[in-house]
Image (spheres, rainbow, N blue to C red):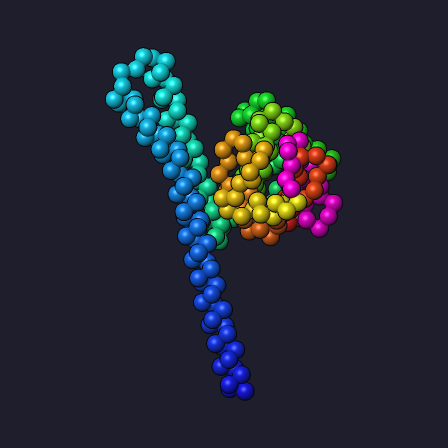
Amino acid sequence: RVATALDDMLDDVVGAEQAARDAEVRLRAFLSDAAHELRTPVAGIRAAADTLVRADLDGPERDQLAAHVAREAARASRLIDDLLTMARVDRGLELHVVDADLRTVVEAEVRRVPLVHPSLRIRAEVPDAAVPVRIDVDRIAQVLSNLVENAARATGGRGSVLLTVDGSGPGARVTVDDDGPGIAGEDRERIFDRLVRLDEGRVSSGGVGLGLPIARGIARAHGGDVRCVPGDAGARFVVTVPRG
């Protein structure tokens, strides 16, 4: 019995060591990918700033370079914010949970989107009765925002997005449908890995591959989830959160 127990302990140690090595490999790959993503906007900022300092430019050229610096700085800042959020998810996201009506959160997102994507057609279908949930309102709003931004990129900012609220099951749900190119069945789980971007349509305008894993991490911190499921056309994501 002692020999068997020691063998089991040794197996546990070997397994833990292998898991630690695998985690280190994943961490190195993640850091390498993050550095690669940051390199592009930083290089653009540096080149434009160097030209602004060294060259004698007329007004339009100078304005164009200044706008490029601002755009690339915003892109780098957005990536850094996403990396920090992902780190918070990893170490245990602190939630400020309150009683809320899921319809209100969805309707607020529908009002926000035209301000940043005026050509995107977005609407919501919500039940007549309140859908009580126990959520961190700001974080669930972030989940919906990430999914809508994903849809906006997929449709070039000119497609249609439908948010449907359903409170009839054990957990409340928001389904986000778009009319973009869709996601192949074999990719529906892979897209939730960090810094994964598909090769076609859905990454045509610069997503860095953190929005979906952040959305899933936030939902799971609530005890819910985000899944990509087959849709009628385009992509369909389903967000579930605990009922109130």
- Quadrant where the N terminus lies? bottom right
- Which residue is depicted at the point 52% across and 78% down? 8
Question: Magenta segment: does it hold 181?
Answer: yes
Q: Is residue 199 left or right of residue 164?
A: left
- Give percent across and percent down for residue 138: 53, 40
Examine the rendered structure and indicate whether residue 243 appears above or below residue 71.
Answer: below
- Give percent across and percent down for residue 210: 50, 42
- Give percent across and percent down for residue 221: 55, 51
Q: Is residue 10 left or right of residue 157?
A: left
Q: Which residues are magenta?
A: 163-184
- Which residue is depicted at the point 64% across and 49% down? 242
- Quadrant hosting residue 175: top right
Question: Magenta segment: does it hold 143?
Answer: no
Q: Nearer the viewer, residue 223 or 27?
A: 27
- Of all residues, the one furthest to the bottom in this rendering is 1
- Which residue is depicted at the point 53% across and 48% down? 193
Task: Decide if residue 119 is in sight here.
Answer: yes
- Which residue is depicted at the point 46% across and 58% down? 23
Examine the rendered structure and indicate whether residue 105 appears above or below residue 156.
Answer: below
- Give percent across and percent down for residue 128: 74, 35
- Quadrant hosting residue 183: top right
